[in-house]
Image (tube, grey):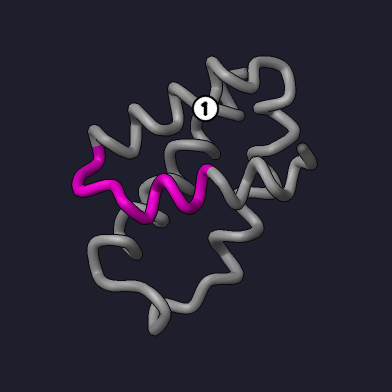
Amino acid sequence: MTKEKHALQILAKLSTATDYSQADQILNNSENELQALYKEVIPVLENKITELSPLDCNSLQWSIYKYTLVYTRSQMEMA
């Protein structure tokens, strides 16, 4: 599977999250599943999120996506 497909798969899972703890769980599970590839998928995921329009999401999804950007950027800084 390509990095883009992995990113889209994570994005689809995030769209179903109902709170930040579920988003954390989705991201942690993705990191465990993808292992070394995760660091390569994150920039693709971040790009996909920044390309989204808030008009295409409900307010919860938009909040989860923005939270994901903060989470992944802070995670990459610590790596």
6 vs 15: above or below: above
- The outermost residue toward the left is 19
Residue 55 picture location, percent across and down: 39, 84
Left or right: residue 29 compared with residue 47: left
Label 1 sits on a secondary structure element that is: helix
**What residue appears at the point 50 percent right and 51 percent down from the top-left corner?**
11
68 vs 28: above or below: below
**What residue appears at the point 60 percent right and 70 percent down from the top-left corner?**
51
Residue 69 picture location, percent across and down: 48, 48
Quarter of the rendering occupied by the N terminus? top right
- The outermost residue toward the front is 1
Mark 1 residue crowding within 10 angstroms, few (<14) / some (14–19) / many (20+): some
**What residue appears at the point 66 percent right and 27 percent down from the top-left corner?**
38
Q: Where are the magenta residues, as a range?
A: 10-20
- 40 drawn magenta: no
Quickly name the residue at label 1: 30
Left or right: residue 73 compared with residue 17: right
Residue 58, quarter of picture: bottom left
| Kind of residue indicated by mark 1 | Ser
**What residue appears at the point 53 percent right and 15 percent down from the top-left corner?**
32
